[in-house]
Amino acid sequence: MIVSGSTSQALAAALARELEEPLAAVEYDRFPDGELLAAAPDVADRDVDRAIVVASTTSSDAHLEVLQLQDAVREAGADEVVTVLPYMGYGRQDKAFEAGHPISARAVARAVSTGTDRVLTVTPHEESICEFFEPTATAVDAADRLAEPLPADLEDPVFLSPDAGAIELAETVRDAYGTGATDYFEKTRLSGTEVEISPSDVAVADRDVVVTDDIIATGSTMSEAVGVLGDRGVGRVFVTCVHPLLARDAVTKLSRAGVEAIYGTDTIERQYSEVSVAPSIADEL
Ligand code: R5P
């Protein structure tokens, strides 16, 4: 039975269809003092072998919902509890960046691990965060799905990543698209919202460019990257990512930078979630 957190209702429904498993009724409520209640009454009414909790932890409330739903399905008698974090919040805080800072990814992974037999997460920022879970989480690679919504008529395309770390992502999307060159920019992060991008040497004049990253958060990385292409006679510029977090004014930044279209998956449910990762998760399950 598939049990959805409030952040991943469309993806949970798509996964239920893929797996041909029932989608549980769920309730999300809040007490007058602000405390949350997430419940899955359906699970209690059935003899459930495997309950799959699906929830992107895009907020602190979403984290808590996961813990409550895991506990609810176990309490209701599920033999096996699987937790799918399509997007794992706090995943980028994978080390103590300053003395006295927490390794937040480890802290949340430990909490999630206590209520589940297995964890899957989609295209984590660093695969090493999977080891913070006990047992180790499975990383589901959904990058190939990003080729699906791209226009079929890309002109001599170049697939660029904003930094060397994301080049494999750009290569995967290029391979899935079927044709095109790949390259990467050099990125220096100046603060949480500011980055500096140095251009790649690849020729972009009259060519369509697809800039690919795992996450678009504030949009600083992508808009800077698109900006450096501006004066080089580039054709159309598309941006694509697995996790369209699109915080604050990210969409405005990208539009002002001249982006033709933004594509993302449904790991975070936004109007730009053009493609579902449900088949990739279903394959792994
Ligand atoms: C960081 O290395 C990630 O791959 C993304 O580039 C980053 O999270 C994007 O963040 P923002 O949109 O805030 O620049």
Image (tube, rainbow, N blue to C red):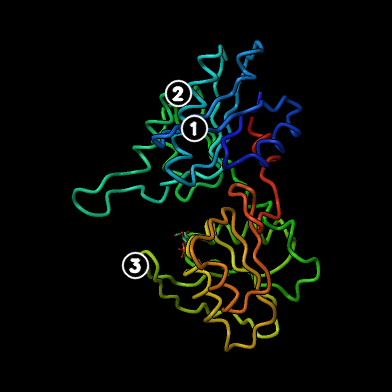
Query: Between disc 2 and disc 3, whose residue precedes?
Result: 2
Is 90 displayed left or right of 20 in the figure? left
Q: Secondary structure at mark 3?
A: loop
Of all residues, the one furthest to the right in this rendering is 153
Q: Residues within 10 Å of mark 2 (few under 14, many from 20)?
A: many
Query: Label 1 sits on what residue type?
Result: Val
Cα distance in 3D space between marks 2 and 3: 35 Å
- Compare residues 147 and 247 and report the one nearer the observer: 247
Residue 115 numbered tag: 2
Q: To which residue does mark 3 refer?
A: 191
Residue drawn 71% across the image and 31% down it? 16
> Does residue 24 lie above or below 237 as drawn?
above
Q: In the rendered view, would you say 219 is above or below 79? A: below
Tags 2 and 1 in contact by the CB under 8 Å rule? Answer: yes
**Is tag 2's residue or tag 1's residue first in the polypeptide sequence?**
1
Q: Quadrant of the N terminus?
A: top right
Closer to the chain start, of discs 1 and 3, is 1
Placement of the C terminus among the 4 image quadrants: top right
**Which residue corresponds to the image point at 62% horizontal and 18% vertical from the top-left?**
43
